[in-house]
Image (cartoon, rainbow, N blue to C red):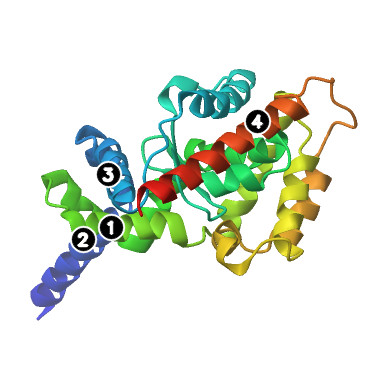
Amino acid sequence: MKKIFIDFTIVSGIILLLFFTFLQVNYIGIFEKLMQRAKVEERLGDFIWESVKISDTEVENAELNSAINKIKDRICEANQINGNRIKIYIVYNSEVNAFALPNHQMVIYSGLITDCDTPEELAGVMSHEIAHMELKHVMKKLSKEMGITMLAIMIGGNGGIAFMKEIARTISSTAYSRNYEREADTKAVEYLENANIDPSFFSVFLNKLTNGELLPSQLYWLSTHPDSEERANSILKLKKKNSYPPNPIFTHEEWLKIKEMAEFEEIEETDSLR
């Protein structure tokens, strides 16, 4: 009887030891390494962009694309971010929206460009999305909402069009957690100030979303980035500088021309579909 008790104690101890050993294994970390080796994030980004293009047509206006990339370059250069790896796609869509994809890709709707009264407002939105990229929020969000198992399918290349569409929907139309939004806002303010862009313009944009200045159908970015009024006030509190060197991204006349290009291209695309 004593021997049985000793054997039982030993076996139980081994089971408990194995259990606690397994608890110490960072399975998420292991999965992330597997995804890196399989270039899953790169593949996800490309596949999702292809899915977006099914419903929205990409803007092919070189001058407009160059202007938007100028904003990106100013933000990235001032913050030691490799801007070359950030690919921006502009699509024809009247909704006010922009969202980050895996693998440092960003989609900007033409409606967002035409709605921003200044290029600094757009810079605020872009800084926020770049922050999501740099803080790795995009893949964390997908892992949480789609599930690690579903994302693991991509390692074998068996995603499928339906799966890609669901991921695109998750990326573009569901909100980040409040914690992620706070982190992205804080980092965006830092990016803007380093680039000598007053974050107050970003606050103005957020307030504009909550003050009923847009049609309900245009408030896409608001639905995916809730609590805009609270965040607008927080951004002003995060500011560290009281003044900024007079170095506008574009002159008022230049910005009006850029907005007109976006409006014209959008109308032209609509006409071509008739």
Of residue 2 and residue 171, the one placed in the foreground of this image is 171
- The residues bearing labels 1 and 3 have C-alpha atoms spaced at a distance of 9 Å
Q: Is residue 40 left or right of residue 181?
A: left
Q: Residue tagged by mark 3? A: 50
Residue 239: x and y, percent?
Answer: 81, 39
- The residues bearing labels 3 and 2 have C-alpha atoms spaced at a distance of 12 Å
Q: Which mark is residue 165?
A: 1
Counting residues from the start of the chain, the first of labels 1 and 4 encountered is: 1
In terms of secondary structure, where does tag 1 sit?
helix
Counting residues from the start of the chain, the first of labels 3 and 4 encountered is: 3
Residue 7: x and y, percent?
Answer: 11, 69
Q: To which quarter of the image does residue 126 belong?
A: top right
- The residues bearing labels 1 and 4 have C-alpha atoms spaced at a distance of 34 Å
Quarter of the image where the N terminus is located = bottom left
Q: Among all residues in the image, which is located at the extreme right? A: 242
* Badge 3: residue crowd in 10 Å (few <14, some 14–19, many ≥20): some
Residue type indicated by callout 4: Lys
- The residues bearing labels 3 and 4 have C-alpha atoms spaced at a distance of 29 Å
Q: Residue tagged by mark 2? A: 162
Residue type indicated by callout 1: Lys
Residue name at image x 76 percent, y 53 percent:
232
> Comparing marks 3 and 4, which lies closer to the viewer?
4
Cβ atoms under marks 1 and 2 closer than 8 Å: yes
- The residues bearing labels 1 and 2 have C-alpha atoms spaced at a distance of 5 Å
